[in-house]
Amino acid sequence: MSIRLAPALDPARYAGRGAAGRGLVTRVRVLAANDNGTAPEAADGGFDPVLVTALRHFARHGLDAARVAHAEARRAAADGQAQEAAEWIAITAMFDRRLAASAARSPIPA
């Protein structure tokens, strides 16, 4: 048994062909969204550095990236490196905001 594929009948499509043929409508040049003519980094000043770092971290650790970033944030906070801890918390927030919020809280002393 053979299968026959037929295009969908779209009245607007067929009406548009006739109008374009008669010169009533101008053709529009459609460009791809990721066209290399203007790079996004040139248009808005660059990509978010935290996003770039988070994507690289995800490439290294895969689905475990949030847990590893959280552990690094805790380690940096325990070592007294506030700036590095803030960076790791920002990376953790890219993956899991609740986990990042728990890393931002200081542990309650016992």
Image: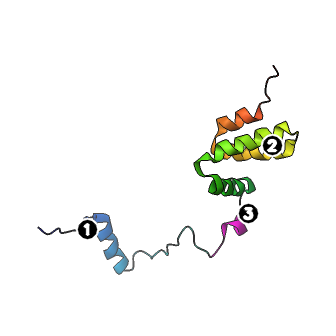
Counting from the top left corner in percent of width and height, residue 83 is at: 85, 45
Label located before the other in sequence (1 or 3)? 1
Counting from the top left corner in percent of width and height, residue 68 is at: 68, 45
- Label 3 sits on a secondary structure element that is loop
Label located before the other in sequence (3 or 2)? 3
Counting from the top left corner in percent of width and height, residue 27 is at: 45, 76
Residue ID for mark 1: 7
Q: Which mark is residue 42?
A: none
Q: Quadrant of residue 81?
A: top right
Counting from the top left corner in percent of width and height, residue 29 is at: 49, 75
Q: In this rendering, does residue 89 appear at all? A: no
Label located before the other in sequence (2 or 1)? 1
Image point (34%, 71%), residue name: 16
Residue ID for mark 3: 46
Q: Amino acid at mark 2?
A: Ala
- Label 2, label 1: how many angstroms apart (C-alpha)? 57 Å
Q: Which residues are magenta?
A: 37-47
Q: Quadrant of residue 66?
A: top right
Image point (86%, 41%), residue name: 82
- Label 1 sits on a secondary structure element that is loop
Residue ID for mark 2: 85
